[in-house]
Amino acid sequence: EMKKMRRVFAAVLAAAVLCLCMAGCGAGEGEAEIIGTCTLTVQDQLQDEKVDIAEGDTVYDILMKTDLAVSGKDTGDGIAIEAIEGVANGDKGEYSGWIYNVNGEMPMDYCDKLEVNDGDEIVWSFSEGM
C-alpha cells in the first residue's frame, strides 16, 4: 500500500512540475499583454505605422518590431542606432546620423531607456548635422 502511495505521489509531483514548466515556457516573448499603440515614422521608410505596445516597451523595442533592417551599438550607457535600412551614421557627413523624437520632443535618453506610452508618436529622422 505504501509503494502504491509513493507511485501516485511521484506521478502527481511529476505532473505538477511538467505543468509549471509548460506554463513558464508559455510566458515567453510575444506573449506580453498589449497596453496600447503608438505611431512610428522612419524617414523614407515608414509613415505613421501603428505599432502595439507591451508593458515596458522602449523606443528601441518599437523600432525592432518593424521589418526594417536596424543595427545598433551598445555604448555601455545605452543602445545607439547606427543604421536603418542601410542608411548609416556618417553617410552624409561626419556628424550625420539617426535621431528620434517622441511627441515632437527630442529626449536626452538612449532609445532603449525611454519607455513608450499609449498614443505616443515616435519619429526617426536622419540628421545631416547632429
Image (cartoon, grey):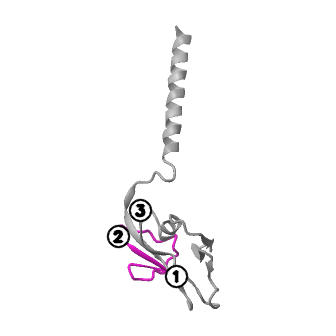
Q: Position of residue 118 (x, y in %)?
A: 35, 67
User: Which of the marked residues, 1 or 3, is nearer the chain's N terminus?
Assistant: 3
- Residue hosting label 2: 119
- Residue hosting label 1: 99
Q: Are marks 2 and 3 in contact (CB under 8 Å)?
A: no
Q: Is residue 117 magenta?
A: yes
Prevailing secondary structure of the magenta residues: loop
Out of 66 and 76, give the one closest to the viewer: 66
Q: Position of residue 29 (x, y in %)?
A: 51, 53
Res 54 quadrant in image: bottom left
Q: Is residue 68 above or below residue 126?
A: above
Q: Is residue 30 above or below residue 72?
A: above
The Cα atoms of the two marked residues, 1 and 2, are separated by 20 Å
Circle number at residue 52: 3
In the rendered structure, which amino acid carries the disc numbered 2?
Gly
Q: Is residue 37 above or below residue 92?
A: above
In the rendered structure, which amino acid carries the disc numbered 3?
Asp
